[in-house]
């Protein structure tokens, strides 16, 4: 079909049939404000902020959902349009708490920004608060229903993208609010703590639980040996939180900033990612060679683990028993590192900087104490670390780059790509191939491009010593469900599967900077792959610090001590 030609504010534009007025306006360089609309989600069309005037029509229409027609003439900035938009936003403000200065989303709130852009300096309606108490039941996420504007973005991401449906619309009219069914707390429903709802929420109605106070307290306590680990994805997103372009690699500045905050040692979770590949890769080989349960499914993502415990308990035996890299690192920090550093593990305070809100739940799991202590004491998201750095007055962009501390700061390119969907699979394939064949991968064949990218489900076949290893990769729980249903039906031919809870993998985690969308996820993933290519060592099993760890402490992959410290079990919920 030929393109459709229309006029938007006297600008001629051509777009494909089926395009919305909003899409046409953006192509014409005309900005139409939006609130409920989100480029990665569906179109609820409930806020009416994007209304426009169409010549010949009696009523205004929502640009986000109204389709273009040949010869259509659209006015986006007429007096009646501006009046309607202001009215819609004023009505929202009349029911919204007036606490912008102390709100976590201050200066990153779409409602606040929209009110400023529309020139709203006074709200003509009486303020009526619903007075609904906050839901603080979850260790990961705080819900403040009074700040909810019923945009339904969280419903869309929870129900359609993640397939969890922990949230729903409750009540009617003025009393309508988004919350778990029967007004339960998030800890009492099937919430997987992924935090994707907090990423798309335009206000402060859903935020991560702020644990920075615990870290400030520990840093000020001279009796504590405070150490920190940073996840692979953080080095590609922290800069964005602090004003740098999306996908900026800030590893060295991040290390310097953490030292300036006062941490006694700054370590790299990538070290534990390499260790995870050693354990999980050998677990795969053991299952392949000895008739174990297949397909083996990765266990790095705590949101995915909780999802499986709720929805697919029959597949728990398929999941690797390996702890996530965060938890492996915590267990080693309070055993191996404590022994080498001569520090009483009771005095070690272990902080993790993670892209993930589900990690906050993970550290509370009762089985995560294999060191004899709570393996990880506090998890901070990318957003929380950003707040700490701003509070400390650290000028991040001007910092000189520094290196991680030894021995738990040494890592490889394989560890770095853990942050992107398909990265765990690729890192594992590199090691499994070399360990099995005895042949070295070259720069030309070390990259497994078939498992990369943002396609929902990716499949590949790798030839290892004449045998075909069929693998699959999925990201986002809605895509994971497709894979899991194939396993349930007996139609799956895979032996190894990577599942990441969040769209894009950890680069799109629920604790990443507000404004995270699929295009920013892609930029962060590209940065991690570039980092991998620049690394001197790109294979987990060639990490000399990991080799030393096995010689001095763990003996060998899947040893008795490895199982005690680095492996876990799961709970039917």
Image: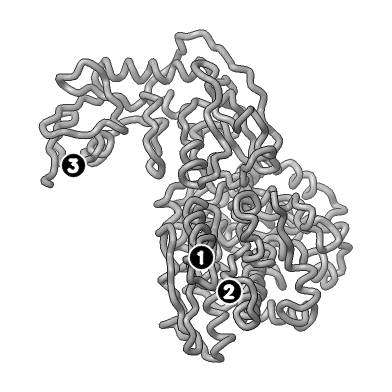
Residue mark closest to the camera, 1 vs 2: 1
241 on left or right of 455: right
Q: Position of residue 571 (x, y in %)?
A: 72, 54
Other-residue count near label 2 (Cα within 10 Å), few / some / many at <14 / 14–19 / ≥20 = many
What residue sits 67% from the left and 33% below the top? 185
Mark 3, residue position: 17
Earlier sequence position, callout 1 versus callout 2: 2
Q: Position of residue 207 (x, y in %)?
A: 60, 37
Residue 226 visible: no
Other-residue count near label 3 (Cα within 10 Å), few / some / many at <14 / 14–19 / ≥20 = some
275 on left or right of 415: right
Q: Position of residue 296 (x, y in %)?
A: 59, 69
CA distance for labels 3 and 2: 48 Å
> Looking at the image, which is closer to me, 390 or 127?
127
Q: Position of residue 328 (x, y in %)?
A: 72, 65
Earlier sequence position, callout 3 versus callout 1: 3
Other-residue count near label 1 (Cα within 10 Å), few / some / many at <14 / 14–19 / ≥20 = few
Mark 1, residue position: 490
In the picture shown, does residue 158 fall above or below 539? Answer: above
> Looking at the image, which is closer to me, 62 or 489?
489
Residues at discs 3 and 2 in contact (Cβ within 8 Å): no
Earlier sequence position, callout 3 versus callout 2: 3
């Amino acid at each position: 079909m030929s393109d459709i030609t229309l006029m938007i504010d006297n600008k001629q534009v051509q777009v494909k049939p089926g395009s919305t007025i909003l899409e046409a306006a953006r192509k014409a360089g005309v900005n139409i404000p939006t609130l409920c609309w989100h480029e990665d989600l569906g179109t609820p069309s409930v806020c009416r902020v994007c209304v426009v005037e169409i010549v010949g029509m009696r009523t205004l229409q929502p640009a986000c959902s109204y389709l273009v027609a040949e010869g259509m003439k659209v006015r986006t900035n007429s007096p009646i349009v501006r009046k309607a938009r202001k009215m819609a936003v004023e009505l929202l403000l009349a029911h919204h708490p007036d606490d912008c200065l102390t709100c976590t989303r201050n200066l990153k709130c779409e409602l606040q920004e929209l009110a400023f852009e529309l020139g709203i300096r006074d709200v003509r309606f009486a303020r009526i608060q619903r007075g609904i108490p906050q839901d603080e039941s979850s260790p990961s996420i705080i819900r403040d229903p009074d700040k909810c504007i019923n945009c339904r973005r969280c419903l869309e991401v929870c129900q359609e993208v993640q397939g969890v449906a922990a949230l729903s619309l409750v009540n009617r009219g003025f009393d309508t609010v988004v919350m778990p069914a029967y007004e339960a707390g998030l800890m009492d429903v099937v919430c997987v703590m992924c935090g994707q709802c907090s990423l798309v929420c335009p206000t402060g109605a859903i935020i991560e639980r702020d644990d920075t106070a615990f870290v400030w307290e520990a840093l000020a306590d001279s009796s504590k040996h405070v150490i920190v680990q940073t996840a692979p994805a953080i080095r590609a997103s922290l800069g964005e939180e602090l004003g740098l372009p999306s996908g900026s690699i800030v590893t060295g500045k991040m290390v310097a900033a953490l030292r300036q905050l006062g941490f006694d040692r700054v370590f790299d979770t990538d070290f534990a990612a390499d260790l995870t590949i050693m354990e999980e890769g050998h677990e795969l080989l053991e299952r392949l060679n000895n008739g174990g349960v297949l397909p083996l499914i990765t266990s790095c993502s705590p949101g995915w683990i909780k999802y499986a415990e709720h929805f697919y308990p029959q597949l728990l035996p398929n999941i690797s028993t390996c702890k996530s890299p965060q938890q492996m690192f915590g267990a080693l920090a309070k055993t191996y590192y404590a022994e080498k550093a001569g520090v009483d593990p009771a005095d070690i305070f272990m902080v993790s900087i993670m892209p993930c809100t589900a990690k906050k739940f993970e550290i509370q799991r009762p089985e995560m104490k294999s060191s004899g202590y709570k393996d990880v004491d506090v998890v901070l998201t990318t957003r929380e670390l950003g707040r700490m750095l701003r509070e400390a007055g650290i000028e991040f962009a001007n910092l000189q780059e520094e290196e991680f501390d030894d021995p738990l700061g040494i890592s490889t390119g394989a560890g770095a790509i853990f942050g992107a969907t398909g990265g765990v699979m690729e890192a594992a394939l590199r090691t499994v191939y070399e360990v099995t064949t005895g042949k070295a991968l070259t720069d030309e064949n070390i990259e497994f491009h078939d498992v990369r990218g943002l396609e929902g489900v990716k499949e590949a076949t790798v030839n290892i010593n004449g045998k075909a290893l069929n693998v699959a990769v999925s990201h986002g729980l809605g895509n994971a469900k497709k894979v899991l249903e194939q396993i349930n039906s007996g139609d799956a031919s895979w032996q190894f599967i990577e599942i990441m809870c969040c769209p894009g993998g950890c680069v799109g985690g629920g604790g990443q900077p507000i404004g995270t969308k699929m295009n920013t996820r892609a930029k962060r993933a590209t940065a991690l792959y570039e980092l991998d290519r620049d690394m001197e060592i790109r294979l987990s099993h060639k990490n000399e610090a990991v080799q030393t760890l096995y010689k001095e402490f763990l003996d060998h992959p899947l040893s008795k001590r490895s199982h005690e410290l680095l492996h876990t079990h799961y709970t039917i919920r």
